[in-house]
Image (tube, grey):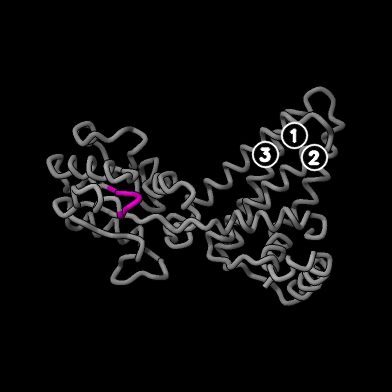
Amino acid sequence: MASSVSISKILKAVTDARGGTPPPRLCVVGAGDQLARVVGVLSAGAKDESGGVSGVVDALAAADFPHDQRLASRWDIVVLVAAGCPVAEASPVVHAARRGGAEVIGLVEGPGHEQWLRETGLFDDEVARGLGPDADGKPTLEHQIVKAAGDGAGSLAQSLPSVRRAYCDHVVLTNAAQNGVIGVVVIIPGADMPAMTANQIRMVLKIAHAYGEELGLDRAIEILSIVGTGFVLRTLARQALDFVPGFGWAVKGAVGFSGTVALGQAAIAYFEAGAPLRLSRMQRINRQIERVKTRLPGPLKGLGS
């Protein structure tokens, strides 16, 4: 598979997946056991977790949150836990966080918080209604954090396993939607495949980065060789759809979307399982990598290490 994909696409996808934006700093504001619970759920599984708190997460009582704009600007995302935090304490936190340039999220679980939301000044798209994998309410705090993190979401997913699945789902759906559109609007037979393949490569490598993979050229090709074996099958299937009369464009859009979702879910399952790799396959992939690297221009050969 690797030899059929442009090396320049893989190199660009590696750069995109690595990002370069540091993980955003989070501050969870609340009171008592509810504050401790939220911080614990967000910090679960983090490599730098100490005393139940990740290094990218701070926890403060509402009364301790700084109102000074310069001090408040140390955080990129401020999560306000409604339970146990009265409006008189919560509202100043919302305004101070916004002045400091932070994205604000209010976590409200269960009914009866509408007045609290109105009086604290939170907007509908700043509200999370569930927490954790078994959350009852949607959107969850994890999904809202990923949205608020923007370009730093990938680095944050690497640091906080609790938001990793929400980030990966977002990456999969975004790329699937793009490929669905490409399948519909590109009318020249076969012309959509390079753009779709580039999207799928970026998607797989962004998922790999979120799971803590060190992405050099060698590892990127290895991952794409294992997880991306469906590239060739989907290419053949989509070429066949060029011969579908009438509504072939609509079918291709659906195949572009569903095929990308299937590949994304396969990639997530692969990394959830610890990225297993059999020795025989590793040896074959290593031979493929070496053949590819012999065709690289001199300055690019070192990117595989």
Q: Position of residue 1 (x, y in %)?
A: 79, 58
Q: Which residue is mark 3?
A: 179
> How many residues crowd around disc 3 within 10 Å: few (fewer than 14), some, or many (20 or more)?
many
Query: From what the image shows, is residue 304 above or below residue 105?
Result: below
Q: Position of residue 218 (x, y in %)?
A: 70, 68
Q: Residue at x 61, y 43 (%)?
A: 175
Amino acid type, callout 2: Arg
Tag in front: 1 or 3: 3
Amino acid type, callout 3: Asn
- Classify the position of the C terminus by image quarter: bottom right
Using the numbered discs, state the Cα–Cα distance from disc 2 to disc 3 in whole angstroms: 12 Å
> How many residues crowd around disc 1 within 10 Å: few (fewer than 14), some, or many (20 or more)?
many
Q: Which residue is mark 1?
A: 252
Sequence-first tag of 1 and 2: 2
Query: From what the image shows, is residue 301 above or below residue 190?
Result: below
Secondary structure category for the residue under label 2: helix
Q: Answer yes or no: do the residues labelled 1 and 2 have beta carbons within 8 Å?
A: yes
Q: Give the residues in magenta.
A: 74-79
> Could you tell me how many numbered marks the image carries?
3
Left or right, 285 with respect to 152, comes to right
Mark drawn on residue 49: none
Using the numbered discs, state the Cα–Cα distance from disc 1 to disc 2 in whole angstroms: 7 Å
Q: Nearer the viewer, residue 45 or 213?
A: 213
Using the numbered discs, state the Cα–Cα distance from disc 1 to disc 3 in whole angstroms: 9 Å
Q: Splitting the image into 4 quarters, where does residue 245 fall?
A: top right
Mark drawn on residue 238: 2
Left or right, 286 with respect to 91, comes to right
Secondary structure category for the residue under label 3: helix
